[in-house]
Amino acid sequence: MAQFEPHWITDEETAKRELMHLAEHLDDVFNGADDGPSSTGFMLLVAYPLGPEDRCSVVSNMPTRDLLAMLKLQVARLEGQAFQTGHA
């Protein structure tokens, strides 16, 4: 397994490149290295640089519609709303 060297992310291009590399690795870990369909979806939110001008990037292996539905569900859970059935 490849080792990642820690370093500061200070710009969008570096963040995009590093997040895409990490997403490929996460997809391999969760779904195997073959090119078959994914059975486990993920989203990763990364804030950079921490400070007064925070930015946040998201990388995922899910279609945007599914990503938004999952994100809305997580926000509701974090805000303490009761779990609701159905689709967002």
Image (tube, helix red, strand yellow):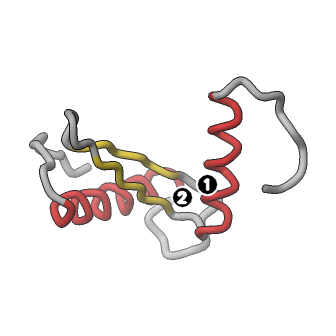
Looking at the rendered image, the disc whose residue lies closer to the viewer, 1 or 2, is 1
Identity, as a three-letter code, of the amino acid under mark 1: Thr
Classed neighbour count for the residue bearing mark 1: other residues with Cα under 10 Å, few (<14), some (14–19), many (≥20): few
Q: Give the vertical position of 82 relative to 21 (above or below).
A: above
- Compute the Cα span from label 1 to label 2: 6 Å
Viewer-closest of 17 and 26:
17
**For numbered disc 2, what is the local secondary structure?**
helix
What residue is shown with label 2? 31
Residue lying furthest top:
80
The single residue placed furthest to the front in the displayed view is: 52
Q: Residues within 10 Å of mark 2 (few under 14, many from 20)?
A: some
Tell me whether circle 1 and circle 2 mark residues in contact (CB < 8 Å): yes
Q: Quadrant of the C terminus?
A: bottom right
Report x, y in % for residue 2.
21, 51
Q: Which quadrant of the view contains residue 52? A: top left
Identify the residue at horizontal 36%, vertical 54% (top origin): 57
Lower sequence index among marks 1 and 2: 2
- When the figure is inspected, residue 36 is found, relative to residue 53, above or below; the finding is below
Q: Amino acid at mark 2?
A: Asn
Residue 42 position in % (x across, y down): 54, 52
How far across and down, in percent of the image, does residue 48 sit?
24, 44
Q: Helix, strand or loop at disc 1?
A: loop
**Quadrant of the image occupied by residue 28:** bottom left
Name the residue nearer the viewer: 39 or 67: 67
The structure residue drawn at horizontal position 70% and vertical position 43%, both measured from the top left corner, is: 73
The residue at the point 41 percent across, 46 percent down is 45
In the displayed structure image, the side of residue 69 where residue 87 appears, left or right:
right
Which residue is labeled 1 in the image?
40
